[in-house]
Image (tube, grey):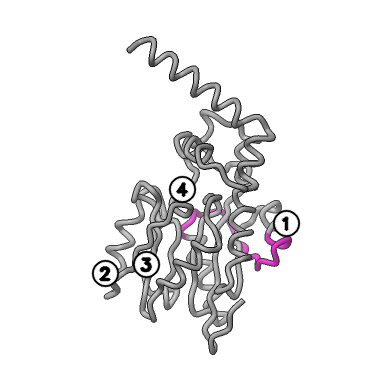
Amino acid sequence: MRRLGLALMWAVVPVKNLTSVKARLSPVLSADERRELFCAMLQDVLVALADTPSLDGIALITRDPAAQLLARRFGAKIITEDRNSGQTNAVTHGVSQLISNGVSDIMQVPGDVPLATAAEFEQVIAAHLPPPAMTISPARDQQGSNCVICSPPNSVALRFGENSFFPHLEAAHQAGIQPTICNLPGLGLDIDTPDDLAELLKRRANTLSHAYLDDSGIARRLQEIQGESSMKAAATA
């Protein structure tokens, strides 16, 4: 963990209730499978963040008991909400709490980017300019915002969702900030849809997410489904 004067850089990870997580994967995964996969992905993210030397701390914004247990395992601060009110409100709440504790730089990261590495987080931090500044790493489709650093933490009005990247760039410009953009392969893959899951399976890596998908039989099942679909497509061509 770094110490540069009084400046503190923290990572914030919002996590909603795991009982209803990743609904868009329901065509291929059961509710239990979606929950277990998200727990594996969240652990992969926490491992990478814990190995990022330029971070002074990690905070999880969550009301979920299982997520809180993981936070304690990694020594992360737990910030609770009165109710689940979406990623944007969760991040805003967490940012306000950390600002009140003297945190000057906040990196916001989702829990569903299992291929993100400490090296990538270091790249984002190294690219971040002196305040006022914003650095953003987009999703691979240039729609979502998979990693955002703001200094000061409340300098740009953030609105997360399926199409947040370009609105975030516009919000930075409106705040008089020229944002720095970091396109990174690991951070760029957030797992929301069956296509995202298929892409994750293509990119073999030593992650807990891959281990879960292999050990549970999900990877084999999805590959068989993909093979059957390819055979049907070829037969009708």
State the extent of the magenta-drawn residues as a range: 71-88
Q: Amino acid at mark 3?
A: Ala
* Tag 3 near tag 2, CB within 8 Å: no
Q: For residue 80: magenta?
A: yes
**Element on which disc 1 rests:** helix
Residue position for label 3 = 157
Is residue 40 depicted above or below 24 in this figure?
A: below
**Element on which disc 4 rests:** loop
Determine the CA span between mark 4 and mark 1: 25 Å
User: Could you tell me residue 44's position as x and y percent?
Assistant: 61, 53
Q: Earlier in the sequence, mark 4 or mark 3?
A: 3
Residue position for label 4 = 189
Q: At x 49% / y 21%, what residue is drawn?
A: 227
Determine the CA span between mark 4 and mark 3: 24 Å
Q: Residues within 10 Å of mark 2 (few under 14, many from 20)?
A: some
Is residue 143 depicted above or below 133 in this figure?
A: above
In the depicted view, which residue is nearer to us: 151 or 200? Answer: 200
Is residue 23 depicted above or below 171 in this figure?
A: above
Residue position for label 1 = 69
Determine the CA span between mark 3 and mark 2: 11 Å
Q: Earlier in the sequence, mark 4 or mark 1?
A: 1
Residue position for label 2 = 173
Determine the CA span between mark 3 and mark 1: 30 Å
User: Could you tell me residue 30's position as x and y percent?
Assistant: 61, 31
Specify whether 235 is left or right of 210: left
Depth-wise, is mark 3 or mark 1 nearer the camera? Answer: 1
